[in-house]
């Protein structure tokens, strides 16, 4: 296969190797996500041309456009971009740590754990939206900690991590079903809507915590990306090359759990984005390794496009974005099974 790597050297003697194809994919995905965001802001009961959306974002719109763009639609789009980016990056981290394409937060039970935390607040306390989000964050973190502790045996092996995650997911799913049976009809309806995954009604209160968390976690993850890539050669080889394997693994797992739990707290358990974004990014870049930045950008683009579909593709009916991502994820899995079968790998 023809290599697309390029070495960049700075005057200070530092050097950086760039994969030109991966960089191109990242730039195209960023453009796609931003264009989809502008289109989404401009569509609705009060349509606004894309040029006016850009003018309003630059502070040159009229008062009506300023209110619609900056107060009603922009926060929802930003939450969609941040949630998609967090899920894409979290999914890539878990798949790289477990060395398994199915090792995503959906399969490992982190989404179910966050759902359990939210259900406890809704069913037992009838809490507010912010309290539900806090409950989801605590539930996700507690589930991640439980999976790590149960999977620990002189280190965390990827295969054992996936098996423990599937078991924890089954248990937490049963707990969620029990909580729903103990709730009254109003709380149950509220819980089911939350469990579908939706961006409806999201505002600046969800934007700032997500933005602050991703601003801290994304650089932290990228700094440790080299160690994660070396760990794909095996723990023994990584130790020999000077990588502190368990420290890097624990640090990146904590980051992945925080990214997934915070995204779930903001929008509910949006399915399949964490699973499919890293796979699609890898197919586009044709590059081995975690593909962290392409997965982040793919997740953001996927979710904002899915939100546009959920709002505009079904006429007057608007669907929660989690329904659309679930359908797209199911179609992707079917296509993956068919292509793998034709290739003779299953």
Image (cartoon, grey):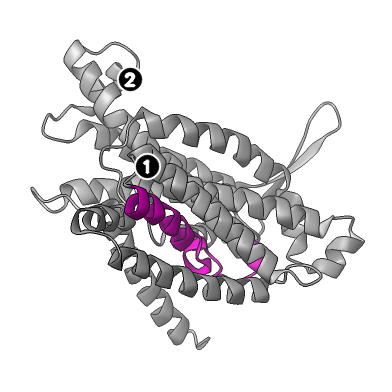
Name the secondary structure under disc 2.
helix
Residue 151: give x, y in percent of width and height: 68, 70
- Position of residue 337 relative to residue 195, above or below, is below
Which stretch appears magenta? 97-125
- Mark 1 — residue? 80
Q: Nearer the viewer, residue 49 or 328?
A: 328
Above or below residue 270? Residue 220 is above
Residue 57 % position (x, y): 33, 20
Task: Name the residue at 44% across, 62% down.
Answer: 112
Q: How far apart are the alpha carbons under marks 2 and 1?
A: 17 Å
Residue 248 appears in view: yes
Task: From the viewer's perspective, tell me whether residue 225 is left or right of residue 273.
Answer: right
Residue 57: mark: 2
In the rendered image, residue 39, in percent from the top left (x then y), is placed at: 26, 36
Q: Which mark is residue 195?
A: none
In screen coordinates, is 84 left or right of 6? left
Q: Quadrant of the N terminus?
A: bottom right
The residue lying at 59 percent from left, 52 percent from top is: 256
Secondary element at image label 1: helix
Can residue 84 be seen at all in this image of the molecule?
no
Q: How many marks?
A: 2
> Residue at the spot x=50%, y=54% of the render?
139
Q: Nearer the viewer, mark 2 or mark 1?
A: 1
């Amino acid at each position: 296969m023809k290599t697309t790597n390029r070495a960049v050297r700075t005057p200070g003697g530092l050097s950086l190797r760039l994969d030109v194809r991966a960089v191109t994919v990242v730039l195209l995905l960023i453009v796609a996500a931003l264009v989809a965001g502008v289109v989404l802001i401009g569509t609705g009961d009060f349509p606004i041309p894309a040029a006016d959306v850009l003018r309003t974002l630059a502070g040159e719109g009229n008062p009506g456009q300023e209110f619609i763009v900056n107060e009603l639609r922009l926060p929802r789009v930003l939450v969609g971009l941040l949630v998609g980016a967090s899920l894409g990056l979290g999914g890539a981290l878990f798949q790289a740590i477990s060395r398994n394409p199915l090792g995503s937060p959906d399969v490992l039970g982190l989404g179910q754990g966050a759902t359990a935390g939210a259900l406890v607040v809704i069913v037992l306390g009838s809490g507010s939206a912010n309290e539900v989000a806090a409950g989801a964050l605590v539930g996700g973190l507690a589930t991640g900690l439980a999976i790590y502790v149960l999977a620990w045996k002189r280190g965390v092996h990827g295969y054992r991590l996936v098996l423990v995650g599937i078991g924890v997911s089954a248990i937490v799913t049963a707990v969620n079903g029990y909580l729903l049976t103990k709730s009254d009809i109003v709380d149950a309806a509220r819980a089911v809507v939350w469990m579908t995954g939706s961006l409806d009604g999201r505002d600046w209160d969800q934007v700032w915590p997500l933005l602050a968390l991703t601003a801290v976690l994304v650089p932290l993850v990228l700094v440790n990306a080299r160690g994660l890539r070396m760990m794909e050669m095996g723990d023994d080889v990584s130790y020999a090359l000077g990588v502190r394997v368990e420290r890097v693994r624990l640090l990146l797992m904590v980051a992945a759990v925080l990214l997934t739990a915070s995204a779930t707290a903001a929008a509910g358990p949006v399915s399949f984005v964490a699973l499919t974004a890293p796979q699609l990014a890898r197919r586009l870049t044709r590059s081995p390794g975690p593909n962290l930045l392409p997965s982040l950008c793919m997740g953001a683009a996927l979710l904002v496009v899915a939100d546009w579909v959920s709002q505009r593709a079904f006429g007057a009916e608007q669907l929660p974005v989690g329904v659309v991502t679930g359908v797209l994820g199911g179609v992707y899995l079917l296509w993956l099974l068919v292509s793998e079968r034709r290739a003779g790998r299953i």
